[in-house]
Amino acid sequence: MLTFINDQLFRMVWLNDLAGWIVQTIFKLNLDEKLGQSLQFFIFDTVKIFILLSVLIFLMGIIQSYFPPERTKVLLGGMKGWKGNLLGALIGTVTPFCSCSSIPIFIGFTTAGLPIGVTFSFLISSPMVDIASIIMLMSFFGWKVAIMYVLVGLMLAVVGGTVIDKLNMNDQVQDYIRDMEEEDIFSEELTFKQRIDFGIEQVKEVAGKVWPYILIGVAIGAGIHNWVPQSYIQSALGNNNVISVFLATLIGIPIYADIFGVLPIAEALFSKGVPIGTLVAFMMAVTTLSLPSLVMLSKVVKPKLLGIFILICLIGILSIGISFNWFLI
């Protein structure tokens, strides 16, 4: 029974079969040929991601409706030390934002006077880990990898925030951010229908932002899955060593996408024999250290703090990737 639920509900075997039927019946392509296989991969992964995305973001939107920014700031304002950093990281898991979208909330938290460690724990956690990613990762790689990814992502967020807090980097936030006025107004209590509407709006907003990256990611994944020889992938990233993890991290940094857009690429690389730790490093680098987000962050914090943030994330991502390869292979 559990196998049936996992295959049909989470891995969506029925959808893969349906995609194969569409390719054969409507497009008149052979599933034994590369073009047919690529189109099946594209249809299956695209529809699968949008189904998961819509359901999960809707549920997260309802949860998020209970934690408006004003209430969250008050909640975090009373927490200090690692407990505050942990709470900031956990709140980041219910915000389905990419790295660039997380920065305005980071600015709001900073303006409200929250401890800098808490704000950075949120900034690391929000794009890297969210509750939706558990189901998404499980659907692609299984429960073990999904749970481990979320746990180590939260750990990196807490450790990163703690280190920045201990270094006393409050003066490294741009002065104009500190000088901004913050309104202290609670949102009115929402009815259940309003929360449902909010969840629907969240789906529309998030899907409206990420759909191009999902299509691009799935297209790249389809190309890698069926057209790039496995020997090429394995020669570059297939070796279970530090160099492959470092290379995957560097490859991920210029790419701008969230977890939903990067998963199809990771899935295709996994099918070509790339170790899971190398893929985890790649996904974390894409979601947390993308160049557009670093450019935006450079307008908010001073170079010293930006450099420390990048260094902490790099060390953490590389350590996590190497550890995954050692313990999960």
Image (cartoon, rainbow, N blue to C red):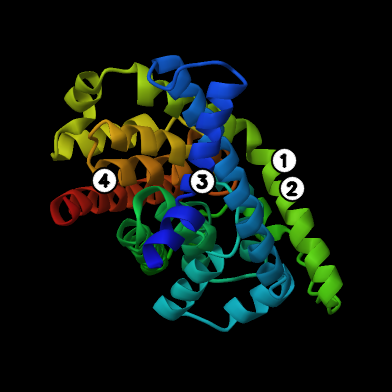
Residue type, label 1: Gly
Which residue in the protein does label 3 denote?
Answer: 14
Image x and y of residue 22, in percent: 58, 28
Packing grade of label 4 (10 A; few <14, some 14-19, many >=20) is many
Q: Is residue 17 above or below residue 172?
A: above
Q: Is residue 114 above or below residue 100?
A: below
Q: Earlier in the sequence, mark 3 or mark 4?
A: 3
Which residue in the protein does label 4 denote?
Answer: 276
Q: Earlier in the sequence, mark 1 or mark 3?
A: 3
Q: Nearer the viewer, mark 1 or mark 3?
A: 3
Residue type, label 4: Ile
Which residue in the protein does label 2 denote?
Answer: 205
Q: Nearer the viewer, mark 2 or mark 3?
A: 3
Image x and y of residue 202, in percent: 73, 55
Check disc 4 and report its element: helix, strand or loop. helix
Image x and y of residue 28, in percent: 56, 16
Inter-mark Cα distance, 2 to 4 = 31 Å
Q: Is residue 320 above or below residue 239?
A: below
> Is residue 7 visible from the viewing direction of this image?
yes
Inter-mark Cα distance, 3 to 4 = 26 Å
Inter-mark Cα distance, 4 to 1 = 30 Å
Packing grade of label 2 (10 A; few <14, some 14-19, many >=20) is few
Check disc 1 and report its element: helix, strand or loop. helix
